[in-house]
Amino acid sequence: MRDQWFIRGRVPMTKSEVRAVSISKLELTADGVLYDVGAGTGSVSIEAALTVPGLQVFALEKKAEAAELIRKNKEKFRAETVTVIEGTAPEAFEGLPAPTHAFIGGSGGNMTSVLDTLLKINPSLRVVVNVIALESLAEITGWMKDRSVDGEITAVQTARSRRAGAYHLMEGQNPVYVIAFGGEESPWAEES
């Protein structure tokens, strides 16, 4: 989905190229429950819900301005399976159905407790985390090492064209690290 289709305001948004990789890495299922933690504009929640009919999505966001943008985007795209939860993770998980999948776009400095809580709720959860800062990458890789979690890290760096007079120049976007781990084995995986 094009970034410009979303109502933005001043709230950060996972860009379309990174959304595509992240949603692919989530390995979503129609009977799944997705927590989108630090949902921002709701772009991941909305695109996931529209891509996988039947997926139940909880867009968790602690900032009131962002939660309101998610509600507006939900209405704009008629994403009926998205529920907006205004609150801070992991406390905001209370009372929600157990997730099968979790996307973390922002943790408000609570990355360790968010991940620990998610895996306590569902140890076979599929998790995808997006980070930009090297300190955040170090934090999540340290967390994975401490808990013997095996995962994969993909660095996504894109460039978009912008008009400069009669020409188009490529303008680099921030690199994003997409960390993926956990989940059930694929029913299509070969048995050895």
Image (tube, rainbow, N blue to C red):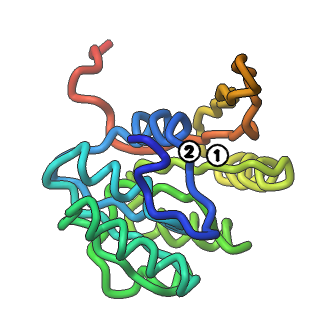
> Does residue 164 appear left or right of residue 52 in this picture?
right
Task: Name the residue type under label 2.
Answer: Lys
> Does residue 59 appear left or right of residue 154 in this picture?
left
Residue at the image point whose x is 57% and y is 69% from the top: 9
Badge 2 density bin: few <14, some 14–19, many ≥20, Cα 10 Å = some
The answer to whether 4 is drawn above or below residue 97 in the figure is above
> Does residue 86 appear left or right of residue 191 in this picture?
right
Residue at the image point whose x is 46% and y is 69% from the top: 120
Which residue is labeled 1 in the image?
148
Task: Name the residue type under label 1.
Answer: Ser
- Picture coordinates of residue 158 (x, y %)? 66, 28
Q: Cα distance, mark 2 to mark 1?
A: 30 Å
Visible residue check, residue 8: yes
- Picture coordinates of residue 68 (x, y %)? 44, 81
Q: Quadrant of the C terminus?
A: top left
> Does residue 165 appear left or right of residue 6 in this picture?
right
Which residue is labeled 2 in the image?
15
- Picture coordinates of residue 76 (x, y %)? 28, 64
Residue at the image point whose x is 75% and y is 48% from the top: 132
Residue nearer the viewer, 119 or 45:
45
